[in-house]
Image: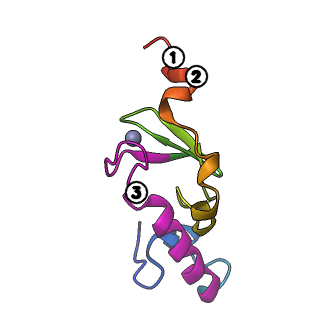
Amino acid sequence: MGRTKVVGIAGRYGPRYGVSIRKRVKEVLEKRYAKHVCPFCGSVGTVYRVSVGIWACRKCGAVWAGAAYTPRSELAQYFKGFIIRPDSFPARRGK
Ligand SMILES: [Zn+2]
């Protein structure tokens, strides 16, 4: 990529959309691609986003519903009961 001094990762959008919205997109994208801590096995950097709001861990195989751009939303602290434990995830059965 070329020079993306101001907007960093949002430089992928080139000159489009205007600088202020690209700066805001940068905030979101940096959070999305940051090294996240797996809430199940605690490893760092193994968490990736499967789809919008769906997060998975390469190490322990856990899949859970998080926020659209971050593995855990601020709301998650109020909804702990909705966390799916890794051992209840179908892909783990039979291992
Ligand atoms: Zn994990």
Amino acid beneath label 1: Arg
Res. 59 image quadrant: top left
**Are the residues tagged 2 and 1 within 8 Å (C-beta)?**
yes
Which of the two labelled residues, at mark 1 and mark 3, occupies the earlier sequence position?
3
Q: How far, Cα to Cα, is label 2 from label 3?
A: 23 Å
What is the magenta range?
20-48
Disc sitting over residue 22 in the figure: none
Residue shown at 62% from the left, 49% from the top: 81
Tag 3, which secondary structure?
loop
Tag shown at residue 93: 1
Give the residue drawn at x 49%, y 33%. Answer: 86
Image location of residue 80, percent across then percent down: 59, 53
Relative side of 77 to 9, left or right: right
| Marks 2, 3: nearer the viewer | 2
Q: Which residue is mark 2?
A: 90
| Residue found at x 43% / y 50% | 39
Residue pointed to by mark 3: 36
70 is within the stretch colored magenta = no
Q: Is mark 3 within 8 Å of ligand 1?
A: no
The C terminus lies in quadrant:
top left
Residue 41 place in picture, x, y as percent: 36, 42
Q: CA distance from mark 2 to mark 1?
A: 5 Å
Quadrant in which residue 90 is drawn: top right
Q: Which amino acid, by three-letter code, is at mark 2?
A: Pro
Quarter of the rendered image showing ligand 1: top left
Disc 2 crowd, CA 10 A, few/some/many (<14, 14-19, 20+): few
Q: Nearer the viewer, residue 78 or 53?
A: 78
Q: Secondary structure at mark 1?
A: loop
Task: Name the foreground residue: 38 vs 83.
Answer: 83
Label 2: element kind: helix
CA gap between label 1 and label 3 equals 25 Å
In contact (CB < 8 Å): disc 1 and disc 3: no
